[in-house]
Each structure stands twice: as C-alpha cells, then as structure tokens.
Image (cartoon, helix red, strand yellow):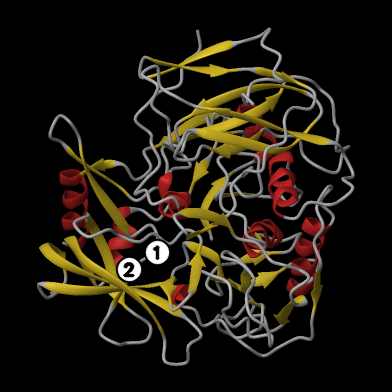
Amino acid sequence: MRYLLHLRRLATCLLFLTPLLATATTVIPASVEKITAKSTDVVHARAIDSQSRWNPERTRIYTYTRFEVRRTLKGTAPNVITVKQMGGSAGGYTQRVSGVQYWQPGEEAVLFLRPSSDRDGTLSITGVMQGSFRLKRQPSGQVMVTNGVPYVSAFDAQTGSTASYRGSRMTLQQLEDRVRKAVQ
Amino acid sequence: MSPFNNFDRRDRVRLVFSGLAMFSLVVLGLVIATPAFSYLPLFTRANGTGHADHWDFNAFPVTFRINPETKDNIRGSISAPDAVTASFAAWVAAPNAALVVNRGPDTTLTSEGFDGNNLICFVCTADFADDSDTIAVTVTTVSDRPGEDTKHGTTSLFAGQILDADILFNPSVDFTTGGTGGESFQTIAVHEVGHFFGLDHSGIVRALMFPFAPDLQTTLSYDDVAGISSLYPKNPADVPTGTIAGTIRSTSGGPIFGAHVFADSTSTALPYGLGVRKSAISAVTRPDGTYSIQGVPIDTYTVTAEPLDEPVSNRNIEGYASAFGKGSVQTDFKTRWH
C-alpha cells in the first residue's frame, strides 16, 4: 500500500534527500477535518480483543477487533463496536495488506469510522491507516496521538519557499478539538 | 566470527543513542556473508521467529492476470495494463535477482482473494474504494506452515511461502500513465509489485519501497535491488556483492531491536551502471540487535544506525515487530555523530 504523500518536484527535492530521512516532501495528507467529514463515527476507544477468520467463501481473511468506546466525538456509536480490517492470520494462512495496522488488547486510539462495505454491522477505518490515531502517553503525562503520517517539510521550487507540515502528531486534546470543530 | 572481522576500522564514527554509544563503520569491499535478512521483506512468524515471505518459483508457475477494464480515472500515453507489465519487467530486470513471473490471460475478476489468481485490477471492489487517500493496495496470502493447500494442486513448502498476491488500484484516484495530470500510475504500480514479490516498506527515501509516493519514480534503487536479490538470489550474480553485518547495542550492552541501519556509499562508483538509481542500502536489526545488509556492491560505505521514528515508523512496517513477537521496534534512542 502506498499513501498519497508526495515528493513534489522531485528533481529539486532530491537535493535535500538523505538516507537520514530529512526529506524534502510535500504532503497531501487527509486532514483531520477531511477524515472527520468522511466518517460517520469518530470515537476514542480501547481495544478489547481481536480475532481473524476467513470469509464464508474462504478467499479473504478479515480481522475483527472489538473496542470499548470511551468517548464519542461524532456519531452515535454503541458502547462496544467492532472494527473490521482486511488481513490477518487464520487456519494456517496469513493474508497481509502492507500498511494495515492491527491493535493489541488495551491499546487506545481515536478512530475515524464508516460502515464496512459489506454492511455487516462492523465498521471500517476511514482512509485505511489515516483514520486511526493511536494514543501514546508521554513521561510528562501529556497524551499524544498520531496516525503515522510523518512530520515533513517541503521545498517548493516554483515559489522558492519551504513549507512545514505538522503531519498528524498532536495532543489528544488538539485532535478532539479539531474533530469537534469539524463536526459543528 | 565477529561480524566486524572484515571491516576496515580506519574511519570509525561514534553514534550515541540517548547517550549510549554505538558504532558506525566505513566498510571497504566485500565483507562477510551471513545467512540473514537484508533490506526488509515481509515476515511470517513461525516457530518463534520471522520468516521472510517469498515465492518459490519452482513450486508452481507464478503468473499475474490483468483485468484490463479501466475508467476515465486512468489517462495517459500508455495503457494501464502495459504500465503494469512494465512495472513487473522493472523488477524482473533487477541485477542479481532471479524472478520467474509471467503475464497470464486477462481476467474479469474485480476483487482480491486467495483463489489461485494473482489479480491486477483497476476498477476494483475492495473496501478502500471510497477512500481517495489510498492509492492502491496489495494483498498477499502466505502459508504459515508447510503442507497447506496452494490452490495449484500442491501443498506449501515453508512458512512464509507466498501463494497468492493481488494488486488493486483505487478507481477513485486520478492516475496518469504519462503526459497528463494525476498520480503517476507506474510509480505506484512498481511499488505495489515490490509488495507482490514480498518486500515491505523501506526507510530509504530514494527506494521504490519508501512508503510515501513521489511524483515520478519508476526505476529501482540500490536498496530495492538489495532487497529483491536477497529474496531471489541469482547464481551466478551479475554484479559481485557482499554483506555488511553487525550488532547494535547500547552502552549498557543491551541489544537494540528495530534500529534502521543503512550503508551509504562514499564514492561516485556505479557498480550497477546507470540503470539503477544509487541509494543507501538498509536493514533493520533483529531482537538480538544483529543486522545484516545483504546485496551490497563492492564500494566504500559509511554505516549508520537510526531509530525508525518518521517519516517511516513502526506503523509502516508493523508486521516486522510482530513477526518477532514484539509490539513495536525500539525508537527510544537518538543518533548522533561525534
């Protein structure tokens, strides 16, 4: 899987690229506001358990993770929701979708959700990866969230300017504020 | 044998991870060859450790089948099927790699699954189709153990054997195959074909397998060549290579798991000629802190280690940690030169 995160005007940008990942990258990430708009539900939730199984046709493996909803930021999600993702391990096989992340029991995340395309009562993560912001508690007590989209800066050869993108790392409070504002 | 036995230590650089010392070395010429992982394949966990996913081209013919149906979201100077075929050809032509894959008859399939068909489709029915932020997806099915049905009338031979791989392009994304606006179709295709062959994302920015898409990049880098030739080595090799191996530890002696270690050439030599983009070549350390960067052409290198703390992070290679029974790679250290 590859995400819509571009190295714009590559010839120029390559001047700035190093293997240390100090990238000259222009990001077109899905913003929190965009992901919120595309989602029917946004919740702060904690993973309870997870299981993977084949579909009835035995062609696809899905992983189902149950979450306890701790706070609802958008929508009317019940107290316990099930998130369905492509891939997982079942019956001697693993089906792998590079870029899809799974949760461990007890892990907390802010999830941007929409009904699964199978309309089976489960929910899917909006934007596959971008709609899952995992919580990480800092030693200072501050709670940070990120969906893995990196912090990068970009050199624009046309304007000669460098723009910085904060990526998706922010405090939980900042994320919740942005979601609530987007919902209004 | 110490992994550093064959290293030239003249230009030793000291790194500090959160105040903990590590080593960076300049390596001259061929170094030791140890059976280990280079670059970053996808891994399947079995018997307590990770096994690199790969096809066995002797087990059954590996063919990909294209559903040629396209919408007006793909425009440009060549057809999408031709661009996909060219993307496979780019990997098949990789020096030092022996890939045996063919294009089979076209198909009308539109969704992925473990069905014996390696599908490439452009108007696909996958669940991501409503997400315009995800460009394409590759789904691979691997055997967790020997003896599983391959859907080809045989049983699997080893844990991590790839049995099926499907590449689905998002019909909600505007692509170009050249000469028009939109995402570079072949840039995406050649990356997904890397997943098809079992490669995970790379932390090397210039690699095709870097997880974030550039505007246009369709030729393999040294990192890509190292990865594919490690999974599918050609014998004899087109270009002589060696392996750089070592162990990353903190000053307290504890191993660092998941450190991104890369060898960067300090010369202008082009051992692969002009057809491969020169880049650093990387590996990621295992739970015991060891690393092994295979497929390294003869040259002079600086070897550096760093945490995978963005832009590529554990989330981009999450299967790596779980393959070794870990929740995440270690990033609680810093890289610094003295």
Q: Please give left or right for residue B219 compared with residue B273 in the image.
A: left
Q: Are marks 2 and 1 in contact (CB under 8 Å)?
A: yes
State the residue at coordinates (40%, 23%). B334
Q: What chain letter is assigned to the residue under label 2?
A: A
Q: Please give left or right for residue A42 compared with residue B73 in the image.
A: left
Residue neighbourhood size for the residue with mark 1, other residues' Cα within 10 Å, grouped as few (<14), some (14–19), many (≥20): many
Can residue A17 be seen from the camera position used here? no
Can residue B57 be seen from the camera position used here? yes
Quarter of the N terminus of chain B within the rendering: top right
State the residue at coordinates (68%, 56%). B187
State the residue at coordinates (35%, 61%). A102
Based on the displayed image, in which of its 4 quarters is residue B36 positioned? top right
Residue B101: x and y, percent?
79, 69
Query: What secondary structure is marked by label 2?
Result: helix
State the residue at coordinates (36%, 38%). A166
Query: What secondary structure is marked by label 1?
Result: loop
Q: Mark 2 or mark 1: name the one nearer the start of the chain.
A: 2
Q: Nearer the viewer, mark 2 or mark 1?
A: 1
Q: Amino acid at mark 1?
A: Gly
Position of A165 relative to B56 (above/below): above
Residue under pointer 1: A127
- Along the line of sight, the residue nearer the viewer: B278 or A178: B278
Residue A48: x and y, percent?
18, 65
Q: Amino acid at mark 2?
A: Lys
Residue under pointer 2: A38
Residue B314: x and y, percent?
42, 45
